[in-house]
């Protein structure tokens, strides 16, 4: 049996009810593996920055969504449209995600690489037909 956690009445007044309203396998696993991590994540609700790889994966998914939508509507996207859509998505999502880039140049380079990387041996851009 796990010992009961100490209640921090000053730092987290009456948050125990909020934490126990929703239990999931991942929360229980977090509690079992590291109680401090559980406390910071679910009681104090401290948000962690998004890893750059995860953010880039989300950007790729957004670009694929745009590409599939344009194919479905039979309206191909031009390179300028792809760049504009990516820029808008990036500007909207990056501050919220609080990505931990090494430098601002790294962030710019990764964004540019998403729309200028050639696909395969055709020499065409990834989202061009």
Image (cartoon, rainbow, N blue to C red):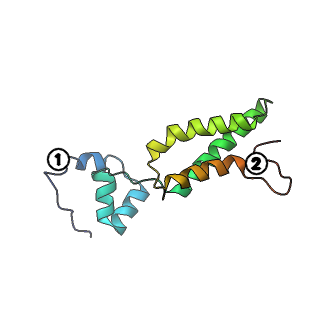
N-terminal-most mark, 1 or 2: 1
The reply, left or right, for residue 6 in relation to residue 72 is left
Nearer mark to the viewer, of 1 and 2: 2
Which residue does the image show at 46% across and 46% down from the upper left? 97
Q: Residues within 10 Å of mark 2 (few under 14, many from 20)?
A: some
Q: Which mark is residue 114?
A: none
Vertical position of residue 79 compared to residue 116: above or below: above
The reply, left or right, for residue 104 in relation to residue 62 is left
Vertical position of residue 54 compared to residue 68: above or below: below
3D distance between C-alphas at marks 1 and 2: 52 Å
**Residue 79: percent from the left, percent from the top?**
74, 38
Q: Which of the two residues, 117 or 75, is positioned nearer the viewer here? A: 117
Which residue does the image show at 58% across and 48% down from the upper left? 58
Please give the residue where the numbered disc 2 appears in the rendered image. 126
Q: Which of the two residues, 121 or 14, is positioned nearer the viewer here? A: 121
Most distant residue in the left direction: 10
**Residue 36: percent from the left, percent from the top?**
29, 63
Which residue does the image show at 36% across and 48% down from the upper left? 22
Vertical position of residue 129 compared to residue 46: above or below: above
Assign a secondary structure to mark 1. loop
**Residue 17: percent from the left, percent from the top?**
25, 46
The reply, left or right, for residue 86 in relation to residue 124 is left
Assign a secondary structure to mark 2. loop
Please give the residue where the numbered disc 1 appears in the rendered image. 13
- The C terminus sits in image quarter: top right
Which residue does the image show at 17% across and 47% down from the upper left? 13
**Residue 77: percent from the left, percent from the top?**
75, 34
Most distant residue in the right direction: 122
- The N terminus sits in image quarter: bottom left
**Is disc 1 in contact with disc 2, using a CB cutoff of under 8 Å?**
no
Q: Quadrant of residue 88?
A: top right
Q: Quadrant of residue 71?
A: top right
């Amino acid at each position: 049996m796990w010992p009961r956690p100490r209640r921090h009445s000053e730092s987290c007044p009456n948050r125990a009810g909020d934490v126990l309203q929703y239990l999931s396998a991942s929360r229980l696993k977090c509690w079992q593996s590291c109680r401090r991590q559980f406390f910071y994540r679910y009681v104090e609700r401290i948000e962690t920055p998004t890893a750059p790889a995860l953010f880039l994966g989300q950007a790729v998914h957004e670009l694929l969504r745009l590409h599939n939508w344009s194919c479905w509507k039979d309206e191909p996207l031009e390179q300028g449209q792809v760049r504009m859509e990516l820029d808008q998505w990036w500007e909207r999502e990056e501050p919220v995600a609080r990505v931990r880039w090494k430098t601002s140049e790294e962030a710019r380079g990764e964004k540019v690489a998403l729309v200028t990387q050639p696909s395969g041996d055709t020499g065409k851009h990834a989202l061009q037909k």
